[in-house]
Amino acid sequence: MAIPVIDFSKLDGKERAETMARIANGCEEWGFFQLVNHGIPVELLERVKKVSSECYKLREERFKGSKPVQLLDTLVKEGDGQRLDNVDWEDVFVLRDDNEWPSNPPDFEETMKEYREEIRKLAEKMMEVMDENLGFEKGCIKKAFSGDGQHPPFFGTKVSHYPPCPRLDLVKGLRAHTDAGGVILLFQDDQVGGLQMLKDGRWIDVQPLADAIVINTGDQIEVLSNGRYKSAWHRVLATSHGNRRSIASFYNPSLKATIAPAAGAATEEAAPPALYPKFLFGDYMDVYAKQKYEPKEPRFEAVRAI
C-alpha cells in the first residue's frame, strides 16, 4: 500500500475533475498524499537541497553535543534497559518572516526566501482546491485562518535533519503525532526514508519521490471540514545510515483566529450538526503543547471547556 501520488498540473486540463476527485480522496481517506508537477521549479528544489545540506554540516558538531545525543550516551553507559522514548532524534530550526535566519551558507537566505514564496503559493492553491471539494466559498479556509482577514495566518518552515543513529534499539526517531495546524507541505529527502503515516491501524511508508511535495492535513482542517478530512498520525523512524533531510512548511491559522466547522455551499438542504467546538487557535495550541503525543480527541474536548 502506497500513499497517493497526484499530478497537480492536470488541474488545468481535461483531467481536472478526476484530479479534484483524487485530491478529495487523498484528504478524506489518507490525510497524506504527494504532488508531482506542482509548479515549483526543479532547479529551485535542487538549490534548497544544497543549501540545507550545507547548513546542516555547519550545525553537525552542535548536534553531537545536543540533548538527544547526551541522553543516549547516558543510557548506553547505564545499560539498564531503558529506551529514549520521550525525546526526538532531530536537528531542527524554524524559518519565519520575522525571525533570525542562518547567515551561512551565504546563499541560504536568498534561496529559502524564494522557496518559501513558492511553497506559500502552492499552499494557498491547495486550500482553494479543498474549498471547492468541500463545497465552501472560494477563499473560505484562508479567510478562517486569518480571522476574517484581521490577522495574518502563521507560515513557518521547519528545516530538520535526522542524523544516523547508532542505537536503533534505544531510539524511536520523531514521535508519532498529528499536526496542530492547517496545511503542511513537505519537501522530504528523496534518498533516505523513515517517514510513516498511520492508515487503518498500519504504519505505511511515505515513499521518497524525487521533486515531489508531500501534503498532509492538520487538526484545523479536520475541524473546518467537520471531520470529512482527518489529520493523520505520522512519525519518523531513526535510521543507522544516511542523514534524512526534511523541510516542512506549515500554513496555520493566526493564534487570534476563531476556528469552527465551516458552512458548506448554499445548495445544501441542511447543514450537518457541528462535531467540533468553536475555539481560538491560540487556546488550541496551549492544549496541544501539553498533549501533542496523546490521542487528539481529548484536545478538542479540552479546548471546548476553555
Image (tube, rainbow, N blue to C red):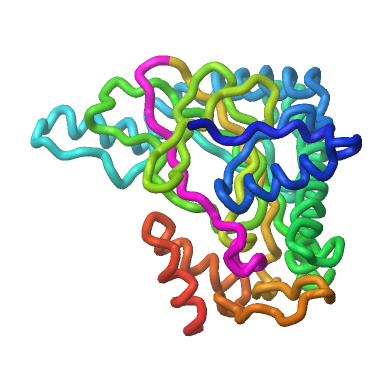
- 82 or 9, nearer to the observer: 9
**260 displayed left or right of 44:** left
Residue 4, position as x, y percentages in the image: 61, 35
- Most frequent secondary structure within the magenta stretch: loop
- The residue lying at 76 percent from left, 72 percent from top is 264
Residue 211, position as x, y percentages in the image: 70, 23
Q: Quadrant of residue 266?
A: bottom right
Q: Is residue 260 above or below residue 216?
A: below
Q: Which residues are magenta?
A: 222-241
- The residue lying at 56 percent from left, 75 percent from top is 276
- The residue lying at 75 percent from left, 68 percent from top is 144
Asked whether residue 257 appears in the rendered view, the answer is yes
Q: Is residue 150 above or below residue 58?
A: below
Residue 3, position as x, y percentages in the image: 56, 35
- 108 or 167, nearer to the observer: 167
Q: Magenta span has 239?
A: yes
- 277 or 73, nearer to the observer: 277
Q: Magenta span has 230?
A: yes
Residue 49, position as x, y percentages in the image: 66, 21
Q: Residue furthest bottom?
A: 305
- The residue lying at 91 percent from left, 35 percent from top is 13
Q: Quadrant of residue 219?
A: bottom right
Q: Is residue 96 above or below residue 63?
A: below
